[in-house]
Image: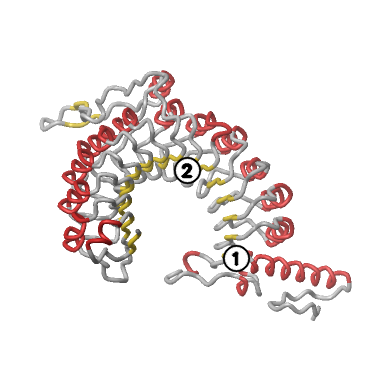
Amino acid sequence: MSYIDTLPSDEESCYYAEHIEFHHDPALAPAATDDELAAVLPHCPNVVSAYLTGVPDLSDRTLIILAESAPNLAHLDVSGCADVTDLGLHALAAQSTSLVSVSINRLSGITDPALARLVRGLPHLEQLEMDSLPLVTSVAVRDVWIFGRGLKKWSMAGCLQVTDSAFPWVPERERLEREGEPAPTVMEDASGSATQRRRTWLESLPPLVLPAMHRLNELHVLDLSHCPKLTDSAMLGIVAHAPHIQHLNLAGCVELTDRAMHAISSLGIHLAAVDIGGLERVTDAGAFVLAASCPRLQFVDISFIPNLSDIVVLELAALPHLRRLAAAGLPRLTDHAAFFLAEHAFELERLHLTHCSQLTLDGVRAMLRRLERLEHLGLSGIPALRRRGVRRFSEPPPEGYNEGKQGAYRVFRAGNIRALGEFLEKEEWRRRESERLNILFTPRGDDSRTLY
């Protein structure tokens, strides 16, 4: 039996309870407190999945009770429960050895020893979400590579202390690190003489050398977004020891360059989704190699990479299975890219070209004419879309959206996309008729075909 935002009320329902879930809604009071949950869990021996993000005061005590009372617990989510600490994770590692998926996102009290013990104690672990853990460093991540060989999904977005030393070492890294090695940092001591800064213990970790056959072959989803200390060296080890990644998120890893794109391209036909948004050091050369080497890409995000131009979008448009493309914030993107998308990317369902200021209505009209499967189109912040009559087809802006600072909000969905296309075609017909009859063309905001 499943219980969502409520607790079992009697002994029988407690015994048959298998799924307990509490949703987090900041606008509402929690459906249950830590004390109420702790009183019920000892009578629920058959719980298989517990999603407790909606119990904000969840404590280690209750987590220990759950681990001791439910030997078959397979799925657990305690993301955002700020009172959970290492003690709770130690109990899970010792008691809940059947766990298959664990989500411990945004727990500020979790440290390396607890995470390492958790991974070592869960032999069946397939999904691990450990986003935004401020105290976790490369030490614990190395244990995941060693003991988490059955992982299928691994997310560690926003782990700010994780560096390249967390990932497997491969011979190619030695040359790459030697070429990119910065000059030693020089500091002044109390006497004013220059001294070289000592390396921290994290910087002095030995390389993580794994056997060539030690691979995470089941790892299909990897999220490393917003880990700012990662460099190209880490990518070399990742693709060597996790060669079957299908979904890869590297958004916000600002130190990555074209060399990382070359490494990722070795994933080839396995890679289906990639997010490299915000990687300002990537150029056309790196993004082009990635698009050309991974023919089965379906979802691509290349937003806010100022060095990219039309040539990358041209290569992406030629992908036969491309369904979603985010290319927002590319100042060099022009109508040439829009025309090429219209001629080749017939499978596109979602397209984001927000803040691509050089796009015009000609390019938009060409895409709307040919991309019949398009269900979501984002064109906010494009000056041409301020044209009279376009706004009525757009979704309303979200609360707090400032058009003066963020540009005109233009997001079109489903039927409104078709309606916008018809409107632009009608206006193009009016313009041409006006030229043919030598009449001054005046834009209209309605659906009338009257010339004046």
The disc labelled 1 sits on which kind of residue?
Answer: Phe
Mark 2–mark 1 CB contact (< 8 Å): no
- Neighbor class of circle 2 (other Cα within 10 Å; few <14, some 14-19, many 20+) is some
Q: Position of residue 368 (x, y in %)?
A: 70, 60
Q: Which residue is mark 2?
A: 280
Q: Position of residue 262 (x, y in %)?
A: 52, 30
Q: Which residue is mark 1?
A: 412
**Mark 1 Cα-neighbour bin, 10 Å: few <14, some 14–19, many ≥20:** many
| Placement of the C terminus among the 4 image quadrants | bottom right
Indicate the quadrant where residue 93 lies.
top left
Q: Identify the residue shown where x is 73% and y is 68%.
A: 422
Count up the numbered dots.
Answer: 2
Residue at screen point 28% across, 34% down: 138
Question: Where 344 falls versus 414 (above or below)?
Answer: above
Which of disc 1 and disc 2 is earlier in sequence?
A: 2
Disc 2, SS = loop
Of badges 2 and 1, nearer the viewer stands 1
